[in-house]
Amino acid sequence: MSIRVLSLLLLLGSALFAKETGSTDFVPRTINFLIFAAILYYLAAEPIKNFFKNRSASIAAKLEEVQVKLKKAKEDKQKAQEELEKAKELAKEILEVTKREIEIMTKEIKEHAQNEIALLEKSFEENIELEKRKRVREITKEVLEELFEDKSLELDKQKFVNLIVKKVA
């Protein structure tokens, strides 16, 4: 419809223009142009329409594909965010459990160390006592050997016991 109106306007305009200039070959040229335009329209209109329809359809398909990918990417991002939050919570729980375990282990190590220290102190005290006894025996032995070797000293039993007690104490 619009092509008919346009061609009518061209014809009327060319007729008016032709009368003013006095040129008679303008009308046949205009008719030739309109015939050329009609043939061009007849031959090229459908392929051009199809090209633009196909182009529009392919652009729409690509746009839809991009939207699907975008939606999937958003879902994946959301899942990743949720997993990140879960991982953070799990890390906090692990940290708390680790702190509690460290406290428990520290307490156990302190208790064990205190028990070891107590055992070492007891062992040290026993060793001191044992060394004292050994030393008393050695001194007693030395005193007795001196007394037995020395014939000039004649002692009776009571003096001998008193002498040993004095040396030992």
Image: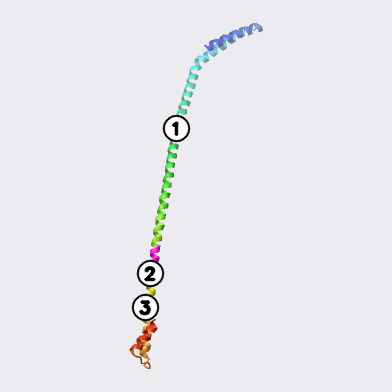
Left or right: where 82 falls relative to 9: left
* Residue 58 spot, x, y in % from top left: 46, 26
Circle 2 residues within 10 Å: few <14, some 14–19, many ≥20? few
The CA span between labels 1 and 2 is 75 Å
Secondary structure of the residue carrying tag 3 is helix
* Residue 112 spot, x, y in % from top left: 38, 62
Q: Which of the 4 image quadrants contains residue 138?
A: bottom left
Q: Which of the 4 image quadrants contains residue 161?
A: bottom left
* Residue 2 spot, x, y in % from top left: 53, 12
Circle 3 residues within 10 Å: few <14, some 14–19, many ≥20? few
Residue assigned mark 2? 122
Q: Is residue 92 above or below residue 125?
A: above
Front: mark 1 or 3: 3
**Three-letter code for the amino acid on which mark 3 is drawn:** Arg
**Three-letter code for the amino acid on which mark 2 is drawn:** Lys
Secondary structure of the residue carrying tag 2 is helix
Q: Is residue 83 above or below residue 162?
A: above
Q: Which residues are magenta?
A: 113-118
Q: In front: 159, or 115?
A: 159
Q: Which of the 4 image quadrants contains residue 104?
A: bottom left
Residue assigned mark 1? 71
Residue 137 highlighted magenta (yes or no): no
| Tag shown at residue 133 | 3
